[in-house]
Image (tube, rainbow, N blue to C red):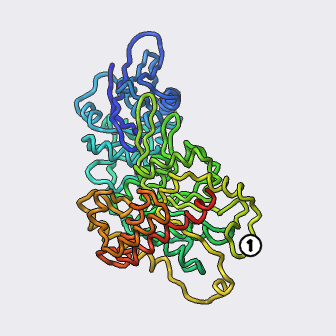
Amino acid sequence: MLAITKSVALQGLDGYMVSIQVDISSGIPQFEIVGLPDASVKESKERVKTAIRNCQWEFLSRKIVVNLAPADIRKEGSAFDLPIAIGILVASQGEKDNVVQNFLENTIIVGELSLNGKVEKVKGILPICLEAQKLGYHKIILPKENANEVSMINGIDIFPVSHLKEVMEHLNGEGVLKKLQVREVDTKNTGVYPFDFSEVKGQENAKRALEIAAAGGHNCLLIGSPGSGKTMLAKRLPSILPDMSWEEMMEVTKIYSIEGYTSENEPIIKTRPFRSPHHTITATSLIGGGRNPRPGEISLAHYGILFLDELPEFPQNILEMLREPLEDKVVTISRLNASTDYPCHFILIASMNPCPCGYYGSKHRQCNCRPEQIKKYLNRISGPLLDRMDLYVEADHVEYNKLDSKEVLETSAQIRKRVNQARKLQRERYQRDGIFTNAELTPKLLEKFCQLDRKSKKILETAFQKLGLSARAYERILKVARTIADLEEKETIQEIHIAEAIQYRSLDRKYWKEES
């Protein structure tokens, strides 16, 4: 007897329908799963067999073949346990009536089974539900523990179950599955940040630069001696990032759902991610990949911040891998059977010391490094990667009178208000151009939205020649100047905006040009 159930598998953030075809026939008793299953899918044989027996149902000593179609794409994970078990039980019962057959044909089933028949939580349930809806299915059976994560989805009937018996009782007419009620989600960012910019004394130049980075989506490099506050500043950057749109929340939550990082109490990611991997991280963990490709830190930082502390300590080959994702905003992981894309639209914030001892250029402490040591240390950061940084900021030594000051400083909430206003101007300006921030401006759009008057052009030309800037650096100065103008709610870029933007591109020449 043949029975067919339907499920959804993920490939990156996208999914595809999997037809689970179960055939039970006479012959030597055996249980086989075909259709390129990985080890976790093959192990479902024992989970399914034991769960069926522990539910007091007979597991037929017949030839059982389960085919996962399409058979040319590798299947992974434990989410096929439940549809396989249901397929075997339905096929064991012989002829199916039209009601059962229609239900199975039009329902996606997802869930892992424990040995007693309990349906366990699975990863990636949000993108699975959205993909099922996209494929035209209007019903999905999933683990009860996953229900809260998808309770905001409209247009598809969701049936949470906690045990295999619930599904079979529904199919046999002995019970009815309860549909999950759709609930409204408060998308307002109510996150409480543990750090605030009002706690940072001094460092006005660095705080200004991070405000510009947040407002325009710009990459930023912080350079300074140990203890100057580089990490402290970076950790407070999430508190001034602009509010997320619903589309951004859903896209980030899909990535976190795949990794199982969503919370039952807060199923939707409402605050922009802040990822801070250690410099011992592997290339696979940072970029993504593996035998069965998974998103890396750059994708977990999507629409948020990727903070690389002590940048020169990261292996150079790993840093070079960041160059394409920084430009393309997507990382493609190619394997023999398939190619997977993960979005990675993040702001890169990096910090570093100016030399191995950390005091090169300091006015308060002498550097003990030899010139060749300094050169070798700085050259760990390649020119092409440096060129992709929009802002270079020096975190200066903080004077005692600043630290002892009782002055009331500007809070993160006040700064975020300006950032949100600047982002609003950018969304309105670029609504027909397919971008959202100044950092995304293409050369064609730069000509359209970053026109300069004669005096501003002269200032930029002088800087270009004196600093030996590249074409990419020229474009990035214009983008930063556009953001500075937006923070002041100015429609046109003025001389003062260009001058400030150039200031943030000159610091790299202080260190790298002198040591080259």
Residue assigned mark 1: 365
Identify the image quadrant of residue 20.
top left
Q: Residue 353: x and y, percent?
A: 65, 63
What secondary structure is found at the residue carrying circle 1?
loop
Give the position of the N terminus as an image quadrant: top left
- State the residue in front, 37 or 272: 272
Q: Is residue 325 visible?
A: yes
User: Could you tell me residue 196's position as x and y percent?
Assistant: 54, 75
Which residue ends up furthest to the top in the rendered image?
Answer: 27
Above-or-below relation of 7 to 236: above
Q: Residue furthest right?
A: 368
Identify the amino acid type marked 1: Arg
The image quadrant where one finds the C terminus is bottom right
Residue 449 position in % (x across, y down): 28, 66
User: Horizontally, is 279 left or right of 265 in the view?
Assistant: right
Q: Residue at x 65, y 79 (%)?
A: 398
Q: Left or right: 308 with respect to 126?
A: right
**Quadrant housing residue 69:** top left
**Residue drawn at x 31%, y 74% as measured from the top left:** 454
Neighbour tally class for label 1: few under 14, some 14-19, many 20 plus, Cα within 10 Å: few
